[in-house]
C-alpha cells in the first residue's frame, strides 16, 4: 500500500439530524484527507456519535452531503458504508470472545469453498490464517497464535484485533470510537502507534476521544463539535490544548474578547 | 501487545497448550473425560463386570438415544438458549413412524421421513417464535413440549398408549451389530481419511509458516487412534459394533463437520458468543437461530426413531421419563456452556457416556433408582458449577 497522502478522502457537508423534536446535528462539516488522522472532539451531546452514525450508516442524517473521493455517496445502512470502504471500530469492539483471533478477523465474511458449487461453505481456515497474519504483519501487531480465543487477550491486543479487522475490510477510512478509553499507559501507546501506522499506509482515520493528550500526540487535524455544529476545524500545529478546550466548552469567544 | 504474559516464550508445546487452556477459561473436554475415567474406576472396583466387553457393548447402545438428543440440545445451547421439548418431540417422531408402519402399512422410507419431519416441523415452528418474535426459548419449548405431548396422546391413546414396532428396519437397527471384520475395515478407512485430511492441512499450514508443532498433531492423531482401537476392540470382543451406535456416531461426525468446519457453524458460535457483534458483522442472526432449532428438530426426530427401534415400541410413557432431562444434563456435563457460544458437539457424546455409565453401573451393583438420581444430580450440579465459575472468572477479567 503506497501512502497517497494529501488527497481529499471524505468530505462531510451540512449534516443535519433531528431525533423527534431534538436537533442532534445542526450543521456539521469537515474533511478528511488520505493519510490524515482527524480527532473529532466535543462535549457530551455535542453530536460526535450522531455524526459517526451518519457516516457509518447506523443512523443516516436527515440532510447534508457526504463525498467520498470527490463523489457524492448515499449511506443508508452499515452495509453501504462497508461497501464504500468505511469501517467503524466500536467502543465495545464488537468481538466474539469465544472465537479465535482469525475467526474474529473474518467474522461474517469468512473465506469459504463450495466443493459442490452451491450450498453451505467449507471454511478455508489456512487461507484465512495466512491473510490474517499478513494484515497483522503490515500493522506490526504481535499476537499469539491466531486460533487463540479473543477472551485470552489483553485489552490492547483486543483493540488491535478490532483495528486489524477494520483494515482487513475497510480500504479507505477507519472510524474509531474511544479506542484508548479502557487501556493502560503502555497499551494506549501501542494503539496510538497503530493509529499512526494506519495513516502512514494511506488510510484516513477519524478518532473520537476525550483524551486531549492523545489528540495532540497523534492527530493531524482537530474538529470540534458543539451543540451539533462544527465550531473548529484546524491543523493541530496551529492550535494549543487551551484553544481546543475552550472551543469544546464554548468559552472561546469570552477568551477571545478578553484578549 | 508484544506477547506479554499471554504466551510464555519458552517451554514445551505441551506447556504452552496447557497454559492457553487455563488462560482461555475454556477447559474443553478435559473435565468430562477425567470424570468419566473416575466413574469407570469406581464402578469397576465395585463390580468387576462393569468393564467387560459385554457390558460395554450394552453401554454403547444405551448412550445412543441420550447422545442423539444431547446432540440436538447442543445446537440450541450453543445459541445460549434451551429446548425443553426434545423429549416429547422425539416421542412424536416415534409415534408417527409407528402409526404409519403398523396401521397404514406405508413404505418404510416414507414413515422415516414423516417421523423425522414431524420433529423438524416442531423445531422449525419453535425457532420461528424464538427468532422472529423474540419469545424466550425456555417458554416456547415448554409450550412446544405440551403440544407434542398432546399430539402423542392423540395418536397413541386409542391404541392403548403404545404401539409395538414389527418392521424389518427398526428390528435391524435395534438389534444388529456390525461383524468385527466390517467394523475394523470401516474404522480403518475412516481413520485413514481423517488422518490424511489432518496431515494435509497441517502440512499446508507449516508450508505457509505457521501451525502447531508436529508433536501436538501427532499426539492428537495417536490419541484418536488409541480410542478407536480400544473401543472397536472391546465391542468386537463381544458381538461387534451395534448399528445404533454407528448411526449415532454418523450424526455426531456430521454435526462436528457442520459446527467446526463450515461457515454456518462459525456463525452459530458467533451468535451464541456475542449476538450483537455477530449482527454488526453482517451475520443473519435470526436465520442462524431458526436453522439451529430446525437442525435440532431433525436430530430429535432421529433420536426418537432410534429410541423406538431400541425398545421395539413407540410408547407415550417414554415422554414422561427423564429422557429430556438426561439429554440436557449430558450436553452440560459435556462442557457445553448454558450461557452460549462455548462447547462442542463431542461433549454430547462424552456427557451421554457419563450419564449412561452412572445408570448402567448403578443397575449393575443393584442400587435403587433413588441413589442413581442422586448421583446423576450431583454430577450435573458439579458440571454447571464449573461452567458458572469459569464464566465468572471471564467476567472478572472483563471478557464475558
Image: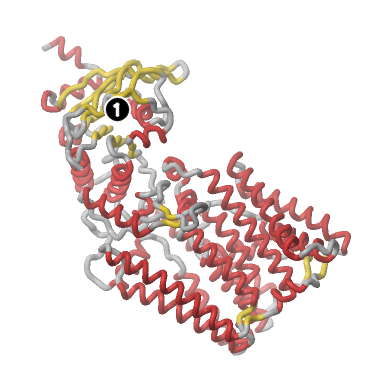
Tell me the quarter of the image containing the C terminus of chain A: top left
**Residue reaching furthest to the front:** A117
The chain ID associated with circle 1 is A
Tell me what residue is drawn at x 65 percent, y 68 percent. Answer: B65
Q: Position of residue A156 (x, y in %)?
A: 27, 48
Tell me what residue is drawn at x 64 percent, y 78 percent. Answer: B242
Image colouring: secondary structure
Q: Position of residue B73 (x, y in %)?
A: 59, 59
Find numbered disc 1 in the image and state the secondary structure of the residue it sits on: strand
In the displayed structure, B331 sits above or below B359; it is: above
* Tag count: 1
Which image quadrant for residue B57?
A: bottom right
Q: Position of residue A226 (x, y in %)?
A: 29, 20
Would residue B269 be visible to someone looking at this image?
A: no
Would residue B372 be visible to someone looking at this image?
A: yes
Which image quadrant for residue B358?
A: bottom right
The answer to whether A239 appears left or right of A101 in the picture is left
**Residue reaching furthest to the top:** A257
Which residue is denoted by mark 1 in the rendering?
A68
The answer to whether B184 appears left or right of B123 in the picture is left
Tell me the quarter of the image containing the N terminus of chain A: top left
In the displayed structure, B206 sits above or below B183; it is: above
Tell me what residue is drawn at x 46 percent, y 55 percent. Answer: A114
The answer to whether B63 appears left or right of A138 in the picture is right
Amino acid at each position: 500500500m503506497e501512502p497517497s497522502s494529501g488527497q481529499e478522502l471524505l468530505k462531510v457537508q451540512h449534516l443535519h439530524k433531528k431525533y423527534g423534536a431534538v436537533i442532534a446535528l445542526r450543521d456539521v462539516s469537515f474533511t478528511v484527507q488520505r493519510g490524515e488522522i482527524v480527532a473529532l472532539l466535543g462535549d457530551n451531546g455535542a453530536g460526535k456519535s450522531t455524526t459517526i452514525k451518519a457516516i457509518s450508516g447506523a443512523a443516516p442524517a436527515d440532510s447534508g452531503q457526504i463525498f467520498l473521493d470527490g463523489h457524492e455517496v448515499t449511506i443508508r445502512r452499515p452495509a453501504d458504508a462497508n461497501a464504500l470502504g468505511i469501517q467503524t471500530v466500536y467502543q465495545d469492539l464488537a468481538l466474539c470472545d469465544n472465537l479465535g483471533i482469525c475467526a474474529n478477523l473474518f467474522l461474517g465474511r469468512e473465506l469459504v469453498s463450495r466443493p459442490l458449487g452451491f450450498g453451505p461453505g467449507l471454511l478455508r481456515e489456512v487461507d484465512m490464517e495466512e491473510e490474517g497474519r499478513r494484515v497483522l504483519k503490515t500493522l506490526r501487531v504481535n499476537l499469539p497464535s491466531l486460533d487463540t480465543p479473543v477472551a485470552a487477550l489483553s485489552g490492547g491486543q483486543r483493540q488491535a484485533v478490532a483495528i486489524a479487522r477494520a483494515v482487513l475490510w475497510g480500504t479507505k477510512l477507519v472510524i474509531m470510537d474511544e479506542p484508548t478509553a479502557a487501556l493502560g499507559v503502555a497499551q494506549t501507546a501501542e494503539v496510538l502507534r497503530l493509529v499512526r501506522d494506519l495513516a502512514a499506509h494511506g488510510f484516513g482515520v477519524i478518532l473520537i476521544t476525550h483524551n486531549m493528550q492523545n489528540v495532540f500526540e497523534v492527530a493531524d487535524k482537530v474538529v470540534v463539535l458543539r451543540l451539533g455544529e462544527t465550531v473548529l476545524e484546524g491543523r493541530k500545529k496551529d492550535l494549543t490544548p487551551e484553544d481546543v478546550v475552550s472551543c469544546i466548552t464554548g468559552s472561546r469567544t469570552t477568551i477571545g474578547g478578553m484578549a | 501487545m508484544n506477547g506479554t504474559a499471554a504466551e510464555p516464550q519458552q517451554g514445551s508445546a505441551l506447556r504452552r497448550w496447557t497454559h492457553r487452556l487455563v488462560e482461555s477459561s475454556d477447559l474443553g473436554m478435559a473435565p468430562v473425560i477425567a470424570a468419566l475415567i473416575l466413574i469407570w474406576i469406581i464402578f469397576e472396583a465395585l463390580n468387576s463386570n462393569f468393564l467387560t466387553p459385554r457390558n460395554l457393548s450394552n453401554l454403547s447402545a444405551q448412550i445412543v438415544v441420550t447422545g442423539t438428543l444431547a446432540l440436538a440440545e447442543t445446537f440450541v445451547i450453543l445459541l445460549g438458549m434451551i429446548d425443553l421439548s426434545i423429549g416429547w418431540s422425539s416421542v412424536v417422531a416415534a409415534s408417527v413412524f409407528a402409526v404409519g408402519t403398523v396401521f397404514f402399512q406405508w413404505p418404510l422410507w416414507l414413515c422415516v421421513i414423516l417421523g423425522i419431519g414431524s420433529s423438524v416441523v416442531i423445531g422449525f415452528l419453535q425457532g420461528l417464535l424464538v427468532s422472529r418474535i423474540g419469545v424466550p426459548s425456555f417458554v416456547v419449548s415448554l409450550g412446544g413440549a405440551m403440544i407434542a405431548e398432546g399430539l402423542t396422546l392423540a395418536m397413541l391413546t386409542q391404541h392403548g398408549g403404545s404401539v409395538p414396532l414389527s418392521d424389518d428396519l427398526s428390528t435391524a437397527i435395534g438389534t444388529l451389530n456390525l461383524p468385527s471384520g466390517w467394523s475394523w475395515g470401516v474404522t480403518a478407512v475412516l481413520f485413514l481419511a481423517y488422518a490424511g485430511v489432518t496431515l494435509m492441512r497441517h502440512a499446508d499450514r507449516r508450508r505457509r509458516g505457521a501451525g502447531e508443532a508436529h508433536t501436538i498433531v501427532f499426539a492428537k492423531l495417536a490419541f484418536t487412534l488409541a480410542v478407536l482401537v480400544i473401543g472397536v476392540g472391546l465391542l468386537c470382543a463381544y458381538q461387534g459394533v451395534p448399528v445404533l451406535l454407528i448411526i449415532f456416531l454418523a450424526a455426531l461426525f456430521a454435526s462436528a463437520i457442520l459446527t467446526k468446519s463450515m461457515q454456518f457453524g462459525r456463525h452459530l458460535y458467533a451468535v451464541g458468543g456475542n449476538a450483537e457483534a455477530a449482527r454488526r458483522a453482517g451475520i443473519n442472526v435470526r436465520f442462524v437461530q431458526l436453522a439451529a432449532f430446525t437442525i435440532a428438530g431433525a436430530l430429535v426426530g432421529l433420536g426418537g426413531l432410534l429410541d423406538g427401534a431400541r425398545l421395539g415400541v413407540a410408547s407415550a410413557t417414554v415422554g414422561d421419563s427423564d429422557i429430556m432431562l438426561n439429554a440436557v444434563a449430558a450436553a452440560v456435563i459435556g462442557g457445553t456452556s448454558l450461557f452460549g457460544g462455548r462447547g462442542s458437539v463431542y461433549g454430547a457424546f462424552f456427557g451421554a457416556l457419563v450419564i449412561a455409565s452412572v445408570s448402567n453401573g448403578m443397575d449393575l451393583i443393584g442400587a435403587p433408582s433413588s441413589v442413581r438420581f442422586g448421583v446423576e444430580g450431583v454430577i450435573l450440579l458439579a458440571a454447571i458449577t464449573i461452567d458458572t465459575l469459569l464464566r465468572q472468572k471471564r467476567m472478572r477479567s472483563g471478557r464475558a
